[in-house]
Amino acid sequence: MKAKFTLLAWFMRHGILQPGRTVTNQLAGRGQRFPPPEDLPARKLCPSKDMEGECPQEANGSHPEQREERPPTSDLAMDDGSCAGPVKTGETVITEGKAKIIFPSANEVFYNPVQEFNRDLTCAVITEFIRLQLSAKGIQIAVPGEEKIEKVVVDLSEGEEAGSEPAPDGEGAAQAMAVGEVCKEGVRILEALAASGLRSIRFAKEVPGLQAVVANDFSSKAVELMARNIQFNGVGHLVTSSLADARMLMYQQKAEKHPFDIIDLDPYGSPAIFLDAAVQAVSEGGLLCVTCTDMAVMAGNSGETCYSKYGAMSIKGKFCHEMALRIILHSLDLRANCYQRYIVPLLSVSADFYIRVFVRVFTGQATAKASASKQALLYNCVGCGTHHFQRLGKMTSHGSNFKYSAASGPPVGPSCEHCHQRHQLGGPMWAEPLHDQAFVQRVLSALGSNPGRFGTQDRIQGVLSMVTEELSDVPLYYTLDCLSSTIHCNTPSLLQFRSALLHAGYRVSLSHACKNAIKTDAPPSILWDIMRCWERLHPVKRERHTDTSPAFHILSVEPTLQASFTIREDANPKSRKQGLKRFQENPEAYWGPKARAKAGGGISTSLQDKRKLYQNKRKERAEDRSHMKHSPCKRLKEGSSAGAEKCCPSPEAAPEALKTESPPQ
């Protein structure tokens, strides 16, 4: 009792408390916190009669050592008694790129290490975008690691493209904006769904030419952790944490006419609900970076859900990954058209379990009118996989003027001309190029002049190299295994099939979205002629084909093209010759999609445990039928034997005459 009175007297003496009010209410009203528990024993609380004489330094808290050891009153740096430093017990420090983040063991805030490639690629793309934006204003940027390369280029007078391109940016190295500096005329970045803030911190520590970075999240746990990580990395002068609904934040910035130059959307699942606000809140010519991880929806498993989210019907096909890229681009352009804006894709990538697109947004009523001619419906044959595109609009030029009208079609008949099967209708989807080849080359050149900048740089260079080799004017692709399985023959090698197309006078390329993809401007009839010629060299047993099968109809037609499978030198692309990396090795087991962060902060069940729990849940096991009902069907109850053999009664309740050795069907 005496100790309690002594503590109250000490608080009242120093003006912290007022008579007649409780300790908790007054401290809460003043916005202060109780001292950490470990600090209380260190403070030598004197008896009330000795408070004025024996320990004056401890009473007023002016002891130098105690003032230095006590953490600041800010909640972000307060340790709550767990340890003396910013890292609490049960937390780990994760290093990625130049950033280090504090991450809790509880699944309060989402973090996935597999997205390192996504974040590295984003930093590389944003760096080159900022370089283009600021160079128009006469401002140069200095990327760490590029200065040494530039000096070597100048000293040796080398004319290599990879080393000579950054040289103009290095001429004014003294005036160039360095990483970590606030550029008043730089870009403003919004990471709308920042979680731990890792991406925003990496922007501040790896990308020059920034004016400000806003790291926003709707979770208070995430914002608290984000603010700690910002302080932990010392980037508070560039990065600001924000607790808000991402949509309301973007709408507010648009209303205040203070848009963001770059908006990054990387949600858990679909970004559909944020797209409308994003296309309005980005500045003129600004950059939108969008990630979609709901690939099951976009790849055709739930076409109706895809339509409700993105305004397009997805269908199953071997080309599903590129189709997902074209669906999200269609959705972005459709939402931008509502505000007389349109998109220009810079880079569109399908990687692992997600897709990532980088697009610029411009305003222009005349150009927005042409958006209908950039979208197309897809006719896909369910038998042989042949697909055709039908543009939604048509744009014709009359001198300096353009006329916009509806397109004519359809491009196919009631059934497939090759296998006589029906068509599926998908889309609409983006039918224009997915990438800006000149911009991709700039990113590749910057990576080549700065080796070792990113942890996944080898994979970035491999993917972008394949992107530069893709046929930009050919939407979607075929796969060798699909073509050969349709006619039930063995599969030709990639070089043999590519050589056959080249010998026939058509263009062909690979695709970064699929390992054995074939993108070509050859019509489907040429593809099937090549497969017919291949089947003659490697015959199949045609007697096994039914009269209605796709293989029967395709092989019953004589080829009009005599294909040559002699391997050509140009059939093997440069990226394949060099063996560039498209995938990275998994650093740990189950390295892939992670469980969603829980609002309560509890430990979520791991995905592999969930898979075991729900594995074969729809299959009946022959040894376990305890869950089945023990009553015969209605026909047996009524005493009718007609059709009883088709019923599925339980074994115990059925008559002996109707029991069979086989399990119920």
Image: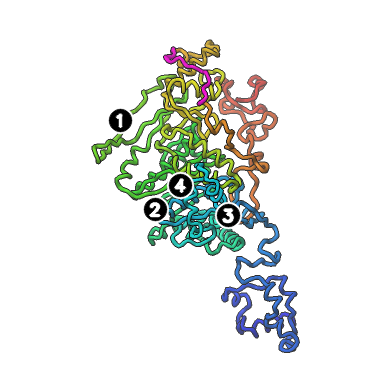
Residue 280 shows which numbered tag? 2
**Circle 4 or circle 3, nearest the eye:** 3
Q: Quadrant of the N terminus?
A: bottom right
Dot 2, crowdedness within 10 Å: few (<14), some or many (≥20)?
many
Residue 198 shows which numbered tag? 3
Alpha carbon distance from label 4 to label 2: 14 Å
Verify CB contact (< 8 Å) between mark 1 and mark 3. Answer: no
Name the side, left or right, on which 173 lies relative to 86: left
Verify CB contact (< 8 Å) between mark 4 and mark 2. Answer: no
Residue bounds of the magenta highlight? 557-570
Q: Earlier in the sequence, mark 4 or mark 3?
A: 3
Name the side, left or right, on which 515 lies relative to 38: left
Residue 408 shows which numbered tag? 1
Residue at 42% x, 48% y is 360
Q: Dot 3 lies on which element? A: helix
Tag 2: amino acid: Gln
When asked about the image quadrant of residue 344, the answer is top left
Tag 4: amino acid: Ala
Q: Earlier in the sequence, mark 1 or mark 3?
A: 3
Verify CB contact (< 8 Å) between mark 3 and mark 2. Answer: no
